[in-house]
Image (cartoon, rainbow, N blue to C red):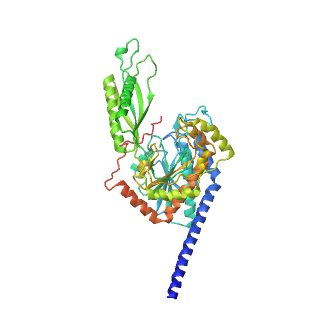
Amino acid sequence: MKKVKLTFLALLHLVVFSTFAQDKKTVAEQKEVIETLDKKKEHYAEISKKIWDLAEVGYQEYKSSEILQEELKKEGFAVEKGVAGIPTAFVATYGSGKPVISILAEFDALPGMAQETVSERKVIEGQKAGHACGHHLFGAGSSAAAIAVKDWLKKGGKTGTIKLMGCPAEEGGSGKVYMVREGVFKDSDVVLHWHPADRNGANPSSSLANVSGKFRFTGIAAHAAGAPERGRSALDGVEAMNNMVNMMREHVPQETRIHYVITRGGEAPNVVPAFAEVYYYARHPSREIVRDVWSRINKAAEGAALGTGTKVELEVTGGAYDILPIESLAKAMYKNLEMVGGVKYSPEEIAFAEKLIPSLTAPGKTSPLYSEAEKVAQFSTKLESMGGSTDVGDVSWAVPTVGLAAATWVPGTPAHSWQAVAAGGMTIGPKGMMVAAKTLALTAIDLFKDPALIKTAQADFLKARGENFKYEAMVGDRKPALDYRK
C-alpha cells in the first residue's frame, strides 16, 4: 500500500512538474515574441505614418497597399495581389499545411478628414482625406503580427500557414464582402482582426448590418426664371426623397440608423438642375430589417421621382453583415490582451491628451481620463455592440473570427473625428497599434499550438450560424464599386 501511494505521489509530482515546465516555456516563448515586436516598433510606426501621410480613400489605396505588400515580401511572404477583382486587395502567405490562420489588414482613409497631428482643429492644406478610423495603424499592426508569427513558425520549424489579408475599402466600399464572395477565406481555419479605438478590450461584440447606395435623379434643365415650367428639377427629386425618408424614421425599429449626404445638387441657382445625387446608408443589428428598411427607402425614391417628374436610378455601393461573435475565441484573445496590457503615456502625450480632452466633452458627460488607455476592460460574456458597421461581418459568417480593440486614441475620442486623425498620426497611435500586434501574434500562436481550440471555435461557429445558413451578399452579384469614392 505504501509503495502504491509513493508511486502515485511520484506520478502526481511528475505531472505538476511537467505542467510547470510547460507553463514556464510558454511564458518564455510569449516574452520572446513580445520582445521581437518591441525591437521593431519604430519601424512599424514609420510604416503606419507613411500610410497616414498618403491618406488614400477606398479602392484608391495603391501606394498604401504596395507599402504593406513590399514589407511582407521582404519578410519571405508570397504575395498575390489584385484578388477578388480588386487592384488594391492582396493575400500574403507564409508556411504550408494546416492550420491556416489569417489576419485582416485595412488601409483606407476617410474623405474630408485631413488633420495635422495637433490637439486643435487644423486641416492639412491641399489634403482631401484623413485616417479618422485608424486604418493606417490597422494595416501596419496586423502586418507586424503576421511577421512575428512567421518568425515563430520559422524558428521552430513548425507546420502551418499564416496569411495576411490586405483588405481595401472598408469604409463603405465593402472590400471584404467581395473577397468572401470570391472564396478568398475558404481555406482559413480562424480569422483574427483588430480595430483602433479609445480603449482596450476583447469582449465578444457584434456590429450593425448595413446597406449603402447612391440615388441618382435625372430631370430637365431650364432657365430657373425665364422658363421654370419647362424644367423638372432633379434636386427636387432628392429633397422630396429625403423628406419622405425623414418622416419614415418614426416608423422603423428604434435601433435603425439612416444617414445621407447630397453629393450633387446642381451647378447654379438659375439653372433647374438636370442631375442630382444623394448617398444613403441604412443600418440595424439585423440584416433582415436592414433589407426591409432599404426597400422602403427605395420606394421613397421612386415616389419622389414620380411626384417631381424626374427619373431615378440606384447604385448599391456597399453592404455588410453583422459580426458573428465566437465566445471561445474571445476568451483566448482576452487572455493574451490582459497579459500584454495597455499603454502608458509619456509626459508629452499626456500634455497632448489634456489639451485635446476639452474638445471631446459632450453635454452631460465628464471629461474622459487619459489613464484609461493603460487598462484592459474586464471580460464579459454579455454581447456588446460596436455601434458601427464593418465588412468584417461577412468574414465572420464565413469562418470563425475574433477581434480586439486597442487604445490608439485619447480615451473618449469617437471614430471618424479629427481628434482620431491627430492622435493616430502621432506617437499615441503606434503605441496602441503594438498592443494589438502583440495580442494578435500571441493568439495566432495559441491556435497553432492548440488544435482543440480551433476545433471548439469551429463547433461554436457552426452552432451560432445555424444549420440552414446560406450566404447571400448584401451587395448582390454586382462587381466591386471601384469608383465609389471618385
At 34% from the left and 15% from the top, the residue drawn is 229
Q: Is residue 239 above or below residue 209?
A: above
- Where is residue 86 drawn, in percent x and y? 45, 45
When asked about the image quadrant of residue 38, the answer is bottom right
When asked about the image quadrant of residue 468, the answer is bottom left
Towards the viewer: 245 or 6: 6
In the current view of this chain or complex, which residue is farthest to the top? Answer: 226
In the current view of this chain or complex, which residue is farthest to the right? Answer: 347
In the displayed structure image, the side of residue 405 where residue 460 appears, left or right = left
- Where is residue 136 drawn, in percent x and y? 56, 45
- Where is residue 68 drawn, in percent x and y? 55, 49
- Where is residue 173 drawn, in percent x and y? 45, 41
Is residue 115 at least partly visible in the picture?
no
Towards the viewer: 103 or 220: 103
When asked about the image quadrant of residue 75, the answer is bottom right
Towards the viewer: 406 or 149: 406
Number of marks in the rendered image:
0
Q: Is residue 476 above or below residue 41?
A: above
Q: Is residue 59 above or below residue 75?
A: above
Towards the viewer: 131 or 271: 131
At 37% from the left and 31% from the top, the residue drawn is 245
